Amino acid sequence: MKFRTLFALLAAALLLAGCAKKDEAASVYSPAPKATPTPRVTAAPTPTEPAAPTPTERPAAVEAELRAIRDMIDGERFYEAFRAMQSFEEKHSAPEEIAACEELFQELDRRLIALEPETGAELMRSFTVQGGGVLEVSAFTGPCLITVTDAYAELEGNPNPGLVCFYVRQGERGSVHVPAGTYRVRYQVGYRWFGGEDGFGEYLTAGELEEPLVFDFYMSGNWASNSKYTITL
């Protein structure tokens, strides 16, 4: 009885020891838990500015036209340059070509502004005396060139009638003095003054007053008075 009990106790002890070793082995050889992979962060590519487009090279023929216009301006052939610009813009429509032509026009315009006569400047006078009659002109619609001619001398066919030409800038008022007499008044209202014999070129409106103007001279005691006319164009 005691032997069986001892044997049973030994068997139980061995069984427990075997379980303990099995648990220890399991503990020793159990694989380690897999580490959670660290997320991999990839930086987004930095956006870059699109490359600037390469400017389109103008055709050689266009460059030659623009260079010819520049030569006209440098040579003070202003009217010829202006007409060439008009022809250029009628032929070409590319924005960069029109812009190049406009740059030349701005340069031409600066030169023409510097060239323009002062208001009241007499560009020609053949009268031998200044005179007391006054013709005043207000240039409302554009710069004006006024020509005052002796009406009777023209009527008689005189090839060199007395005359005076004077200039009035747009938006200003100018005047000229003439001797007593009867005069025809002709005018040109232009766009730009190109100077010299070109004047306004073909870019003008020309006209003449319907009736000649009569400039009288009056004496009243010690006082003298003269006619004065004012016209607006």
Image: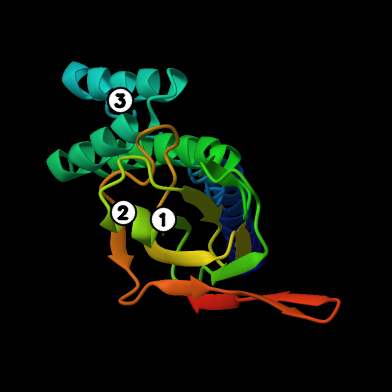
Give how far apart the Cα atoms at labels 1 and 2 are: 8 Å
Q: Position of residue 159 (x, y in %)?
A: 30, 40
SS label for mark 3: helix
- Nearer the observer, 79 or 44: 79
Q: Which residue is mark 3?
A: 66
SS label for mark 1: strand
- Nearer the observer, 223 or 169: 223
Q: Which residue is mark 2?
A: 154
Give the number of the disc on residue 117. none
Give the number of the disc on residue 149. 1
Disc 2 residue type (three-letter): Glu
Toward the right, the furthest residue is 222
* Residue 50 shows up from this direction: no
Dot in front, 3 or 1: 1
Mark 3 surroundings within 10 Å by alpha-carbon count, few (fewer than 14), some (14 through 19), many (20 or more): some
Are dots 1 and 2 in contact, CB under 8 Å? yes
- Nearer the observer, 109 or 158: 158
Toward the left, the furthest residue is 91
Mark 1 surroundings within 10 Å by alpha-carbon count, few (fewer than 14), some (14 through 19), many (20 or more): many
In the rendered image, the quadrant that contains the N terminus is: bottom right
Disc 1 residue type (three-letter): Thr
Residue 112 left/right relative to 85: right
- Closer to the chain start, of discs 3 and 2, is 3
Q: Image point 41% across, 40% down: which residue?
A: 105
Disc 3 residue type (three-letter): Leu
The part of the image, by quadrant, that contains residue 94 is top left
Q: Is residue 191 above or below residue 48?
A: below
Give how far apart the Cα atoms at labels 3 and 1 are: 42 Å
Q: Position of residue 219 (x, y in %)?
A: 73, 77
